[in-house]
Image (tube, helix red, strand yellow):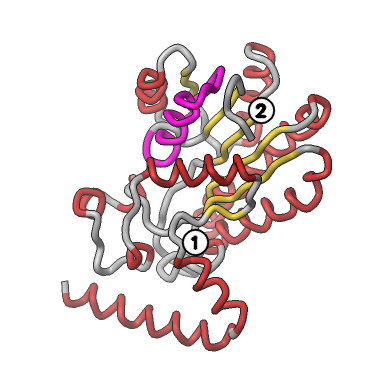
Amino acid sequence: MDLKDKITVITGAGSGIGRALAVRFAELGARAVVCTDLNVDNAQETASMIGPAGSAQLLDVADEQAIEQLICDIEQRLGGIDIFVSNAGYGQAGGIDLPTADWHRMMNVHTWSHLAAARALIPGMIKRGGGYLLSTASAAGLLTQIDSGPYAVSKHAAVALAEWLAINYADQGIGVSVLCPQAVRTNILGPAAKRSGKSNSSQASGDGVLEPEFVADACVEAMHEGRFLVLPHPEVATYFQRKASDYDRWLGGMRRLRERLGSRKKAQ
C-alpha cells in the first residue's frame, strides 16, 4: 500500500504510536490524515504537527455509532477512505476481580471498535477497488498479559478479527495488518517507564522499550509489503513459535515469569 495521495484515518492519534503514524503518513504524501482521539486537544496538536494535510476530530471508539458517523462524515467531506488505522487503546490491571463492565469497556475499545470500522468501511473500499485496515493489537494478543485479563482477552480477539478479515477479504482488494509490539514508549507504560525506558517489573518491557517512530516505520514497511503481522520486537515471533510448539511448557514458563515479576515488585 502506497501512502501517496491517500485519505487516511487514525484513532488514538493524540500521542504515541498513533501520533507517530500520523506524522509518517503525512511525510509519505498522504492527501489527508484525520487524527482522532478521545482527547481532541491532543489530536489537534498532532494535526498541527502535520500541516495542511492534517485535521482532528473527537472520537470515543467505544461508541460504535460515533465510529460509523465519523466515517460517513469524512467520506462525504474528503472522499473514500483508503486507509483506516484502529489504534486507540488503554491499559488496566486486574482479572476476575474486575466488574464485567470493565471487561466490556476494554472489548469495546480493543475489539468491537475494529469491527465497527471494518463494517462501515469494507463495502465502500471494495466498490472503489480496495483499501487497507491496520489494527493495533499487542504481543499480548499472541501471547498474554499476566497482570490484565481483559487486556489479554481483548487483544487476542483483535488479532483473531484481523486474521478473519484478512482471510475473507484479501481477494477483494482489502489489505490487513495487525501490529503486535511489546513495550513502546506511550502513555500506557506510565510516566516513570516512559522517562527511563525501563520497567523492571513489567512483562512487556523485558525486550526493551521502542520509540513510537520506530514502530510506525515497521507498520509502513509491513503495509508496503502487504504483510499481516507487524512485529517490531522480533523476539515475539520466537515466543509465539514456542507457545505453538509446546503449549503446556509455555504455560509453565509464563507462571514462572509471573512469580519473578511479583518478587521484583515486592522488592521495589
Q: Is residue 8 above or below residue 259?
A: above
Question: Which portion, as a residue range, is magenta?
Answer: 15-38
Decide: is 50 above or below 205: above
Looking at the image, which residue is at 17% across and 77% down? 267
Q: Position of residue 216 (x, y in %)?
A: 45, 41
Q: Earlier in the sequence, mark 1 or mark 2?
A: 2
Disc 2 element: loop
Secondary structure at badge 1 equals: helix
Q: Is any part of residue 112 visible from this angle?
A: no
Magenta region includes residue 22:
yes
Instruction: Bin the neighbour count of mark 1 within 10 Å (Cα to Cα): few under 14, some 14-19, many 20 and up.
Output: many
Q: Residue at x 53, y 43 (%)?
A: 221
* Mark seen at residue 197: none
Q: Position of residue 73 (x, y in %)?
A: 64, 17
According to the picture, the residue beneath numbered tag 2 turns out to be 82
Determine which of the numbered discs, if any, sits on residue 139 in the image. Answer: 1
Q: What residue is drawn where x is 45% and y is 37%? A: 18
Q: Tell which of 148 and 215 is nearer to you.
A: 215
Circle 2: is it few (<14), some (14-19), or many (20+) Cα within 10 Å?
Answer: many
Q: Quadrant of the N terminus?
A: top right
Find residue 187 and report its image quarter.
Answer: top left
User: Is residue 120 in view from this perspective?
Assistant: yes
The answer to whether 187 is drawn above or below residue 202 in the figure is above
Specify the amino acid type for callout 1.
Ala
Does residue 241 appear left or right of residue 46 in this picture?
right
